[in-house]
Structure formats: structure tokens, C-alpha cells
Image: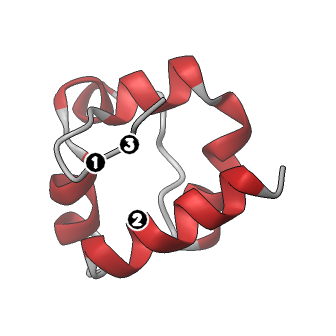
Amino acid sequence: MDITRETLISDIVENCPEAMPAFQAIGMHCMGCAMASGETLEQACAAHGVDPDEFLDALREYLENC
């Protein structure tokens, strides 16, 4: 799956459930909440005070090593 800043959190969780620990590590614990279903990775990062580009790089690296 090609994950970008515009990818919905719900799509990431559905297609890459192994990514959940990476989100939880930065404080995103409500992956199944109503907001996550329509929220992009960029929006989620903004809501949690995380740089989206840095997180995207870390997430891609995390998924490569799973």
C-alpha cells in the first residue's frame, strides 16, 4: 500500500493492521474511533502535534521492517 499524507487512517488500519503500534507509539490510540474513519494521516498528525513528514518516513520504515 502506498501511504501518503492524504491516506485515510481507516484505510491504513484496514490494509496494514501491523501499523497500529507505530501510531500508538506517538499517542494515537483511538485508531477505531469515529474521527479516524474520515481523517487523513496529515490531519491525525496535526491533531496530535506530530510532524506528518517525519511520521510518514518513520511509518514507512516501520512497515518495511515488520
The residue shown at (72%, 53%) is: 64
Q: Which residue is mark 1?
A: 4
Evaluate if marks 1 and 2 touch, with contact meaning CB atoms under 8 Å apart: yes
Evaluate if marks 3 and 1 touch, with contact meaning CB atoms under 8 Å apart: yes
Evaluate if marks 3 and 2 touch, with contact meaning CB atoms under 8 Å apart: yes
The residue shown at (38%, 81%) is: 54
Q: Which residue is mark 3?
A: 3
The residue shown at (61%, 29%) is: 16
**Vertical position of residue 21 compared to residue 46: above or below:** above
Does 18 sit left or right of 47 as displayed?
right
Q: Position of residue 22 (x, y in %)?
A: 63, 60
Q: Which residue is mark 2?
A: 56
**Vertical position of residue 1 compared to residue 49: above or below:** above
State which tag comes first along the sequence, 3 or 2.
3
- Dot 3 amino acid type: Ile
- Dot 2 amino acid type: Leu
Counting other residues with Cα less than 10 Å from the Cα at mark 3, is it few (<14), some (14-19), or many (20 or more)?
some
- Spatial CA distance of label 1 from label 2 is 7 Å
